[in-house]
Image (cartoon, rainbow, N blue to C red):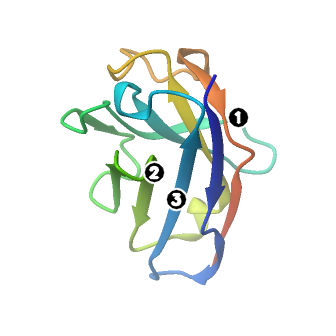
Amino acid sequence: QVQLVESGGGLVQAGDSLRVSCVASGGTFRSTAMAWFRQAPGKEREFVSALSGDGNNIVYATGVRGRFTISRDNAENTVYLEMNSLKPEDTAVYYCAAARNTLVPRTSGTDEYESWGRGTQVTVSS
């Protein structure tokens, strides 16, 4: 099973940018679709973005499309989430997740992903 470690979270102001990273180990990274989810206090974990093992198929949640960019470096076993024009409502713990194969799952549910990191906190002040 893949082990995932997120980093790069922090406290920023509205309108700022931030990049979070996730390093994977213990699996075949280039054959694994990866995703970012987030969970705000008192809310369910929600899908943010996902990309296929080769990086050619990318999906975004409606609320982040145009502001966030997901990418991966298969040589470094790392997936990134570049977040621009951050809003206070983007405040959440951001989790990295690994799918069961190289394709982006058809649904955005958490049960489509078999490995999770511990998360990194992103706080956006107004």
- Identity of the residue drawn at 55% across and 42% down: 24
Q: CA distance from mark 1 to mark 3?
A: 22 Å
Give, as a three-letter code, the residue at label 3: Ser
Q: Quadrant of residue 52?
A: top left
Image quarter of the N terminus: top right
> Which residue carries the number 3 mark?
21
> Which residue carries the number 2 mark?
78
Look at the numbered disc 3 and give the secondary structure of its residue: strand
Image quarter of the C terminus: bottom right
Q: Nearer the viewer, mark 1 or mark 3?
A: 3
105 left or right, relative to 55 = right
Label 1 or label 3, whichever comes before in sequence order:
3
Which residue is outermost to the right? 42
30 left or right, relative to 99 = left
> Which residue carries the number 1 mark?
44
Residue 70 in percent (x, y) is at: 35, 51
Residue 71 in percent (x, y) is at: 32, 52
Give, as a three-letter code, the residue at label 2: Thr
The reply to whether dot 2 and dot 3 touch (C-beta < 8 Å) is: yes
Residue 117 in percent (x, y) is at: 68, 41
- Identity of the residue drawn at 36% across and 43% down: 62
Q: Which mark is residue 3?
A: none
Label 2 or label 3, whichever comes before in sequence order:
3
The reply to whether dot 2 and dot 1 touch (C-beta < 8 Å) is: no
User: Eyeballing the image, is 61 above or below 10?
Assistant: above
Give, as a three-letter code, the residue at label 1: Glu
Q: CA distance from mark 2 to mark 1?
A: 25 Å
110 left or right, relative to 64 = right
Label 2 or label 1, whichever comes before in sequence order:
1
Q: CA distance from mark 2 to mark 3?
A: 7 Å
- Residue 99 in view: yes
- Identity of the residue drawn at 27% across and 58% down: 66
